[in-house]
Each structure stands twice: as C-alpha cells, then as structure tokens.
Amino acid sequence: MTSPQQPSGSGSGAGPSEPVADAAPSQSSTAYDDGGDDRRVLRRQQILQTAKEVFAERGYHNASINEIITRANIARGTFYLYFSNKHKVFDSILGEALTGLRDRITRIEIDDPDAPSPQEQLRQNLVRVLAFLLGDQPLTRLVLNHSQHPQTEVAERVDAFLVGVIDLIEASLTRGVHMGLVRPCDARLIAAALLGAFQGMISDCLRAATPPDVDTVADQMLAFAMFGVFQGR
C-alpha cells in the first residue's frame, strides 16, 4: 500500500501541528464505504462520537486521526470519506452540539390555557438541556476543557461555539422581557453571566463522585436565575 498523500489544495485545512500521517490519502487509496444513507449516517456518528472521546481525553493537539480510526475500528480511507482532517471533525462536533441545544429549547407559551406555567416550561427546557450535556460527558468535557485552551486555533473554535450559546440565551431573555417574564436588563451581559454560572455548576457535577440528578440541578439553576443568592431585607 502506498503512503497517504496530502491532496492538492487541502493545505489550508490542516494546522501546522497536524501529523503527516493524518493527511488525507490519495483518491486511489480511499476506501469506498458501500451502503445506504442510514448506514452512512450511523458511520459518521460513530466517527464523531469516537473523536469526542479522544479529544476530551487527550486534548485537540495531542489527538490524532490514527487514534480515532483505531478506536472506531474503521479504515483510514473510510474516515476521509466523511472528514478531510481533524479540524473538520472538531468543527462538526461543535456544530452538532449547538444544534442539539437549539433543538431542546422551546418557546415559552403564555396564551395557551393548557400549557404549563412559564416557570415550569423554563424548567423543562433546563432539564432537556442538562440531560443532553450531562448525558454526553465527552462532549461537555471537550468544551469545558478547551474553553480556556492556550492554543488560539482551538480556543477560537470553542469560543465561537460559546458565543452561539450566549446568542441562544440572549434571544430567550429578550423574548422574556417582551413577554413580561424577565425584568428589563442588558440581555447580552446577563446571558454571558448565566452561561458562566451554568458552566461552573456543570463542571462541579462532572467532578462529583455522586453527582446530583438532573432535576435537582435544574431546580438550583432556575432558582439562581430567578432569585440570585441574596435575601431581600
């Protein structure tokens, strides 16, 4: 078998620390992953899940495509059918994570008499988001561990993801203000503050030998968001 070749025009996609062994193979050495659309979706998700685990454990720059394909038990050519380099894998993980968060946040209804109270609807949103984050610990550890990463290349990617999360919170707060459910405030600053508080709470849950259940965490987050920590006098 010939050694993998870096395809022309792909040099900008790989960072300076990307090993030569992780370069995409030539077209002639690329394996063909035969199968229907369902199989291709499952294979892509298998690669992403394995990559999340490798990135979370080893860090972005210490992770290699070799380790991802070995753990996923796939051919190198199969990997390159889905991703041209590990930057693309990392970006896809963050992109799907943001989509997953969006999918779990629903608009609060106040005009439907059969809908739960706005507070309960907000709590249900929190429960879904927490179940997503705490249920996919490799993803959550990856984001938390890389949010303060000293290497700009990775930090910029994670920072863009976190900005997207702040955008989601800000939009929810702005709607809440218009609906009379949230006090007038600088929605952007409060969104950033809430994200920081929630990151701290989630980090503590991941470190705990016996973490609290999702409902308990959601209740504490909601209480913090609504009432803060100081008692009025």
Image (cartoon, helix red, strand yellow):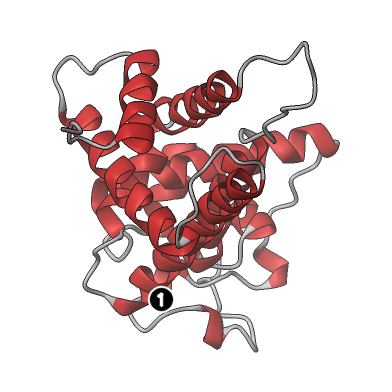
**Quarter containing the C terminus:** top left
- Counting labels gives 1
**Residue 196, position in %: x, y?**
30, 51
Q: Is residue 55 visible?
A: no
Q: Residue furthest front?
A: 233
User: Relative to residue 193, is residue 149 drawn left or right?
Assistant: left
**Residue 194, position in %: x, y?**
36, 48
Q: Look at the picture and state if 39 lies above or below 14.
A: above
Q: Amino acid at mark 1?
A: Val
Q: Look at the picture and state if 91 lies above or below 74.
A: below
**Residue 99, position in %: x, y?**
63, 46
- How crowded pointer 1 is (Cα within 10 Å; few <14, some 14-19, many 20+) is rated as few
**Quarter containing the N terminus:** bottom right
Q: In the image, what residue occupies the spot 48% across and 22% down?
A: 127
Q: In the image, what residue occupies the spot 25% across and 66% down?
A: 149
Q: Toward the viewer: 210 or 67? A: 210
Q: Toward the viewer: 196 or 119? A: 119
Q: Quadrant of residue 12?
A: bottom right
**Residue 73, position in %: x, y?**
49, 37
Which residue is disc 1 drawn over?
20
Q: Toward the viewer: 201 or 191? A: 191
Q: Is residue 7 visible?
A: yes
Q: In the image, what residue occupies the spot 50% across and 32% down?
A: 129
Q: Look at the picture and state if 96 lies above or below 187.
A: above
Q: In the image, what residue occupies the spot 48% across and 57% down?
A: 166
